[in-house]
Structures are given as C-alpha cells and as structure tokens.
Image (spheres, grey):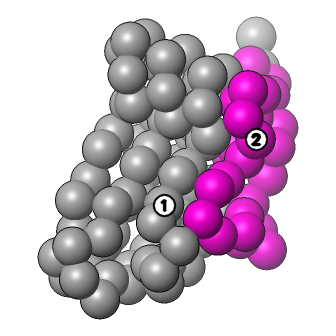
Amino acid sequence: GRSSADGFDLFAAAGVTLESNTAFFNGGSGFVVRDLGPTSGTVARNIGFGNQGHGLSTDHNIALTLACNDWFDNSAGATEGLAPGASDLAVDPYFCD
C-alpha cells in the first residue's frame, strides 16, 4: 500500500493466479497484469481500495476469471481491460470497527 506507482505489477507469460491480496492508496492502479503471450488465469479474493488508477488494470487480450474481489473507491474505476466478475463487489473495506 501507499506506493507512488502501481501496487502489484505482474508480467505473465502463462497462467496467472492472484489471490487474497490487498492494494490500497497507490498512485496508480492497485493490481496490473500485463501480457507477454497468451495468458489466462484467476484473480480472486483481492481488495483494491482507494487507488488513483483502477482497482485492476489488464491488457485487453488477457482472459482472466475474476471472482469475489472488492474494488472500492478507485479513482479511475473498478477495472480496465475486462469487466468486473459477477461476484465482485464495491464495498467499503472499513465495514467493521
């Protein structure tokens, strides 16, 4: 959290598994997945909160399955390059005291 750039920046040459991470208050996007070839995989149970970019940013040719992520209050929106998953949320992660 609190990076002046992107939070997590992955360069994938094959399958991607990005699970159970939190990226918050970064100067860019919370999570970025860039493609170096045909890439598929899963992005699940992550929180992207309060980033200046998107919660998740991907190249347009990456086939990721998104499930049960929380993309809340990111300045540029929830995702870029693909739509949020059917079970993704936009819920304030401060939901508990």
Q: How would you classify the magenta stretch by its main secondary structure?
A: loop
Q: Residues within 10 Å of mark 1 (few under 14, many from 20)?
A: many
In front here: 9 or 60? 60
What residue do we see at 79% from left, 74% from top?
Answer: 86
Give the SS element for disc 1. strand
Q: Quadrant of residue 45?
A: bottom right
Residue 14 picture location, percent across and down: 20, 82
Q: Nearer the viewer, residue 71 or 4?
A: 4
Residue 77 located left or right of residue 54: right
Instruction: Where is residue 21? Give x, y as percent.
Output: 42, 42
Above or below residue 3? Residue 29 is: below
Give the amino acid type for the residue marked by disc 2 in the picture. Answer: Gly
The residue depicted at 23 percent of the width and 83 percent of the height is: 37
Q: Quadrant of residue 13?
A: bottom left
Task: Name above or below for residue 91 compared with residue 75.
Answer: below
Q: Secondary structure at mark 2?
A: loop
Q: Which residues are magenta?
A: 70-95
Specify which label sits upstream in the sequence, 1 or 2: 1
85 drawn magenta: yes
Q: Give the residue number, with chain letter if any, for mark 2.
A: 77
Q: Residue furthest bottom?
A: 38
Q: Is residue 67 in view?
A: no
Which of the 4 image quarters holds residue 90?
A: top right
Residue 13 or 23: which is nearer the viewer? 13
Say which residue label 1 marks. Answer: 58
Q: How many marks?
A: 2
Percent of width and height locating residue 24: 53, 23
